[in-house]
Image (cartoon, helix red, strand yellow):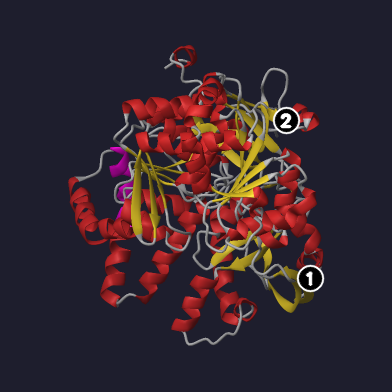
Amino acid sequence: MQTTQVAEAGLQSIPALLARNAAVFGARPAYREKEFGIWQSWTWAEAAGQTRDLALGLLKLGLRPGDHVAIIGRNRPMHYWSMVAAQMCGAVPVPLYQDAVADEMAYVLGNCGARFVVCGDQEQVDKVLEVGERAPAVERLIYTDQRGMRKYDHARMNALADLQAQGRAAESQLGVELDARIAGLGYDQTCVMLYTSGTTGKPKGVVLSNRNIIETSKNSAGFDHLTEREEILAYLPMAWVGDFIFSVGQAYWAGFTVNCPESARTMMTDLREIGPTYFFAPPRVFEGQLTSVMIRMEDAGRVKRWLFDHHMALARRVGPGILEGRPVGIIDRLRYALGDVLVYGPLKNTLGYSRIRVGYTAGEAIGPEIFDFYRSLGINLKQLYGQTEASVFITQQPDGEVRADTVGVPSPGVELKIAESGEVFYRSPGTFVEYFNNPDSTASTKDGEGWVATGDAGFFEEGTGHLRIIDRAKDVGRMADGRMFAPKYVENKLKFYPSILEAVVFGAGRDACTAFINIDLAAVGNWAERNNIAYASYQELAGHPQVYAAIREHVEAVNASVAQDPMLSSCQIARFLVLHKELDPDDGEMTRTRKVRRGVISDKYADLIAALYDGSRNVFTETEVTYEDGRKGRIRATLRIEEARTVPPALHDVKAKGIAA
């Protein structure tokens, strides 16, 4: 449908789409949730009833149009119903990260002025109560899980199930008012407010309208031919724009089924049981799964390892071509079919990817080796490029034009341009309305013609029109001799190796690049056990000489690969150290979406960075850490600094359009 057709059809809000789905797909499953090991299911008709009951309950509590309703908890049908119920009442849902600490919640609750807060369980209730006067607008807490809540003061608390029961009882009293509020929802009315991850400062509330969400969902669903028969797994944070688009926007537009896992611990098991047809994961999920596969293969017998290595070598060579329908010799096709029986099929089944028709990754660049691994198995994994401010979609990769080094072409309805500085700009129907109560940031991000500055540097490939993203514009710089510096490019290559969990590369304005490395405790710990290497802590394992030797090999292999790129060959790592602790959102070193806060790291570890460049062989450091219970502590360590061999760059011409010299 065109925009005018959508509006004429009365589909101008998520509640309107819910009513349409209840009428058209009423008997089809809308939601599933696994609880106590058993999958429960709700049809679209049942979901509409549950959501209406909750909306009536909110009306009875006095929810007003324009109020903000915070939702904090894991992915559960009733939490999605809470967001839509708030919309039915003319209020604005504001999902928060459930792993946020009380101080982070205090900022968001205070900034948006939330009156009502829907809490998943006792833990979230406790955090909101701890916030106290820092969120003075909060009047009412609604909790989903009633365990542990019996002895709390319920003067301003309600169980969600009780609220629904009260809503059902109030149908005759409030039903007409609720219908009027739903009918009054407009296409340009606020649909949801989502907070940015805050990599460089305080998070900003991104206001997205019904038009933003529905137009983007319609266009992106059409791009990949999504239908009501898709199955997705809703496991990513509800506060993240990707989850809202996939689990609400597209789900309500196409009418497909949203499956909620029992917990983060059971997610992989639940993924295998559901077998989604449409799947999204950030690079970290795919990296973690590949690490798990490699660990298992290290523990496998000699014959199984040989079979895996032999068939994966073939898959890397011909798998992407077979997936994309390119000409591949009959012998290779037959060998690949045998590999599918022996290796690829069982592996995809173990991962839960047997039924995937369309898979996406985004959030940050994925290492090309990791991306190619999954496509070689026959999984239609693609990249998209997006932002919260765009309602996710800026570019997508069409089938048959999928490559690891681009993020595709503009999504339907999206316009792109590259500024002289190399920064990418876009405008689209999904372009956000504003930053909440922040006109200065809105004006600096979106101009009067609707063009939004992404903050990313990139260029269009000549001939294909595909967009290549180099890095965050603020992170792309120059070495001391003027050569280009783009840290994310190198970091993603390093994270291909199972033993490397995270990497932070430095080099802007310097003569050479250096790096911090975080080891993956699961992968390196498994290796240590197999080699009879004893260790008592992450810190001890990270500093082990054999670990350093293995990391140096990986760094030097990445250097050889980087040397082949004429534009970024200067980004080879000359020296590195293995950090004594994992970078952690609780310590402010990463966002809740696990993006590195480079400014925080540069300030916090200034002594380590200085040692990487002053020729030191060792450096002593003391670091504050946050424990799981919120207590603060300090850890001390003497870190070793290692040299890595660099490679003379390859000489090639590069043709690129739209990037600054």
Q: Is residue 506 visible?
A: no
Say which of 2 and 11 sits in front: 11
Residue 445, which numbered label? 2
* x then y, percent, for residue 330: 18, 46
- Circle 2 crowding by C-alpha within 10 Å: few under 14, some 14–19, many from 20: some
The reply, left or right, for residue 292 in relation to residue 346 is: right
Residue 409, which numbered label? none
Q: Earlier in the sequence, mark 1 or mark 2?
A: 2
Mark 2 element type: helix
Residue depicted at x 29% and y 51%? 354
Q: Is residue 577 above or below residue 371?
A: below
Rendered image quadrant of residue 515: bottom right
The magenta stretch is 313-325
**Quadrant in the picture for the C terminus:** top right
* Residue position for label 1: 615
Q: Amino acid at mark 2?
A: Thr
